[in-house]
Image (tube, coloured by chain):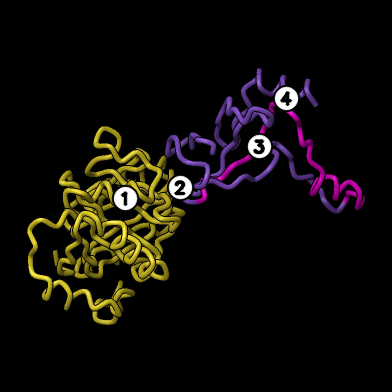
């Protein structure tokens, strides 16, 4: 069981949250210009990192807000929680890129 | 807004009023349960950083919106519960008619005023052991240093989504639950409270 710190509500049980998968995937500006393969890549393909990973969570049973979580997929350790639209903590992002 | 004469309790089939009369007052019951009378509930959404929006709300309600997460603000006959950074639940007795003015007052502020009175039942939970009952089905830290009167939280109670509002330090709680879950939650609460002794109290307390 994870204890996740919602940026608004504070530490709550994992059961109150839903995971939205990998964070910081930008929607293509012009989807019509993409090939099917590129569109499928945007829709379905995820990094599935082993190690530090940036992902989106939503506090479903609480304030129903989305936010980002930096979580290590091996140890389950949550190293950072930051709001939507915020830049990922730099050290985490670098570590995340290196491991991919 | 809500027409109280049309309101139908989702717990009507449990005969709570009759039970509260019949059971009298066993003074040693550790938990008192009641269904709170119908109240107007309005879901309010808007930009809390917008001063004009805040002013308009305060003008109508007589109380400012709570800005801190999971807190409430009480005005005269009106209570406002924080639900999100841009979302609140305004609760009042059905005869408080100034909520109807909210929609007109907020026109042009990009706000949404939605009447949700009948979407939730409100269960009152008081008594010396009320906190222990909640602890059986809720992962929140309910210790007085973390959760006290005037605080609210949306969480899971016995796996049902609820809005928990602590109304007093006795302790006393109001539990807002979707009406389709009301029967389930009531029977769960009564079962969980069984070991402390349960008393069903009248709807008007």
Dot 4 crowding, Cα within 10 Å, few <14, some 14–19, many 20+: some
Q: Sequence order check: which comes first, mark 3 or mark 2?
A: 3
CB of mark 3 within 8 Å of CB of mark 2?
no
Which quadrant holds the C terminus of chain B? bottom left
Residue A54: say if magenta.
yes
Q: Which residue is mark 2?
A: A63
Q: Which residue is mark 3?
A: A55
Helix, strand or loop under label 4: helix
Q: Which residue is mark 1?
A: B134
The chain holding disc 2 is: A
Residue depth check, mark 1 versus mark 2: number of the one nearer the observer? 1
Helix, strand or loop under label 3: strand
Image position of B102 (left or right of B77): right
Colour purple, chain: A
Region in magenta: A33-60
Q: Is residue B4 visible?
A: yes
Q: Which residue is pictured at 79% across the width and 44% down the height?
A: A28
Q: Which residue is pictured at 82% across the width and 43% down the height?
A: A45
How many marks on residues? 4
Image position of B203 (left or right of B189): left
Q: Colour of chain B?
A: yellow
Using the numbered discs, state the Cα–Cα distance from disc 4 to disc 2 in whole angstroms.
Answer: 28 Å
Which quadrant holds the N terminus of chain B? bottom left
Dot 1 crowding, Cα within 10 Å, few <14, some 14–19, many 20+: many
Image position of B151 (left or right of A85): left
CB of mark 4 within 8 Å of CB of mark 2?
no
Q: Are marks 1 and 2 on the same chain?
A: no
């Amino acid at each position: 069981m994870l204890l996740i710190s919602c940026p608004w509500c504070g530490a709550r049980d994992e059961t109150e949250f839903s995971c939205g998968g990998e964070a910081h995937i930008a929607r293509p500006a012009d989807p019509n210009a993409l090939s099917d393969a590129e569109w499928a890549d945007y829709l379905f393909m995820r990094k599935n990192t082993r190690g530090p990973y940036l992902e989106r969570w939503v506090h479903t049973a609480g304030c129903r807000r989305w936010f980002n979580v930096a979580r290590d997929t091996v140890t389950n350790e949550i190293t950072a929680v930051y709001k939507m639209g915020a830049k990922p903590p730099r050290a985490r992002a670098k570590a995340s890129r290196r491991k991919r | 807004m809500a027409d109280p004469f049309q309101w139908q309790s989702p717990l009507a089939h449990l005969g709570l009023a009759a039970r509260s009369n019949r059971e009298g007052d066993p003074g040693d019951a550790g938990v008192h349960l009641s269904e709170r009378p119908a109240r107007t509930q309005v879901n309010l959404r808007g930009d809390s950083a917008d001063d004009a929006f805040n002013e308009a709300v305060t003008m109508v309600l007589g109380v400012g919106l709570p800005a801190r997460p999971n807190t409430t603000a009480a005005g005269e006959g009106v209570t406002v519960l924080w639900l999100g950074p841009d979302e609140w639940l305004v609760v009042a007795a059905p005869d408080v008619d100034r909520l109807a003015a909210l929609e007109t007052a907020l026109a042009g502020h990009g706000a949404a005023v939605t009447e949700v009175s009948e979407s939730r039942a409100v269960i009152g939970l008081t008594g010396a052991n009320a906190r222990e009952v909640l602890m059986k089905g809720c992962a929140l830290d309910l210790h007085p240093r973390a959760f006290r009167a005037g605080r609210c939280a949306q969480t899971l109670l016995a796996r049902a989504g609820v809005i928990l509002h602590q109304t007093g330090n006795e302790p006393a709680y109001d539990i807002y639950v979707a009406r389709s879950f009301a029967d389930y939650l009531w029977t769960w609460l009564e079962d969980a409270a069984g070991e402390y002794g349960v008393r069903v109290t009248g709807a008007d307390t």
